[in-house]
Each structure stands twice: as structure tokens, then as C-alpha cells.
Image (cartoon, rainbow, N blue to C red):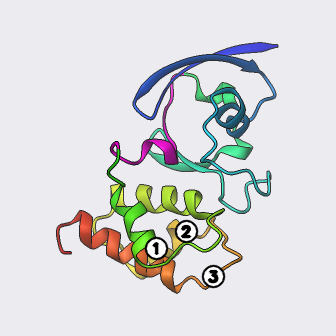
Amino acid sequence: MSFTINATINDKKVSASTEASTSLLEFLRDTLEMKGTKLCCNTGECGACTIIFNGKPINSCVTLAADADGATITTIEGLADGANLHAVQQAFIDTGAVQCGYCTPGYIMSVAALLDRTAKPTAEDIEEAVSGNICRCTGYAKIVDAIHLAADRLSGRA
């Protein structure tokens, strides 16, 4: 059975058809050709596929595309403002919080969602926000540094 999904993705109205069993991740990557959101575990355990869905970070690999009808979605492709990277993206670069980069889009989306709701996150806020994201290449210290730097930049402290 085919569905037509009408959603706002990265501030653009999108209408496209997909099968009922298609995950939101597959819809984004395969139907809409948005390859920034990564497929890794396909079970919602690693966070590489994190997007912002109606203001909240979710794992797109375990969400059906049909659930996106009427939704507002931001992917890693929509986070920057043209050529200007989002503060979180720039902070990850500036602190060296990217290793192979595969998990980075998911981390960035989780952190962007955190900083949208909390201007000055505590250590507990940060731990909770990225608890669903896994990086196998690096220690988490640089990621935490990036989160603090982005928070400072967004609040005008840096």
C-alpha cells in the first residue's frame, strides 16, 4: 500500500509517495535523496539516524515514513543557514569532535535539539541528550567540549 507524505522538511514543503513499510530514514535517504542522515544499526540503538521531528530528536530508522505526514522535520542538511554552519556544526569542527564522521550528524541533531530547549545545559542535560548516540571512534570529551562551545556561542558568551 502506498502513502503520500506531505511534510515540511528543512523549511520546505515536501510531497512524495512511499510504501507503508518504509522507514522515515529510508524515505529521507532513498526517496528524497537526503543522504546526511545515516543508517547504522537500523534498530534505534546508535543514534546515527537522529533527526528533529516536530521539535524533538528521534531515531528515524524506527519511525515509519507514514508517521511523518503533516510533520515538521529538520535533518542535518537543513541545520545550516546556507553557507553558514549552525553553531553546533561549527563547534564540532572547532573542537575536533569528529573522527570518521559517521555518527556526527546524529550527535549534532541531538545537541541542536538540546540547545533549542536549554540555553545552558548541565552535565546531566548533556548526558541525557546524547545518551542515545554512540561513537566508536573517539572518547566523548571532545563531543562534550563541542556542546559547551556551541551553547556559549548560541547564548552570546563566546
Magenta stretch containing residue 80, yes or no?
yes
What is the C-alpha distance between the residues marked 2 and 1?
6 Å
Alpha carbon separation for disc pair 1 and 3: 17 Å
- Expressed as whole percent of the image width and height from the top left, the position of residue 102 reads 66, 62
Q: Residue 126 carries which label?
A: 1
Q: Which mark is residue 138?
A: 3
Q: Residue 128 versus residue 151: which sits nearer the camera?
A: 151
Identity, as a three-letter code, of the amino acid under mark 3: Thr
- The mark lying in front, picked from 3 and 2, is 3
Which residue sits furthest left?
A: 156
Could you tell me the amino acid type at mark 2?
A: Val
Give the residue number, with chain letter if any, for mark 2: 130
- Which part of the image, by quadrant, shows the N terminus? top right
Mark 1, mark 3: which one is toward the viewer? 3
Mark 3 Cα within 10 Å, few/some/many (few <14, many 20+)?
A: some
Q: Which residue shows up at 45% across the image and 70% down it?
A: 92
Q: What is the span of residues highlighted in magenta in the rendered image?
A: 70-82
Callout 3 touching callout 2 (CB < 8 Å): no
Instruction: Say which quarter of the image contains residue 63.
Output: top right
To which quarter of the image does residue 10 belong?
Answer: top left
Indicate the amino acid at tag 1: Ile
Q: What element carries label 1?
A: helix
Instruction: Tell me whether circle 2 and circle 1 mark residues in contact (CB < 8 Å).
Output: yes
Q: In which quarter of the image is the C terminus?
A: bottom left
Quick one: label 3 or label 2, which is nearer the N terminus? 2
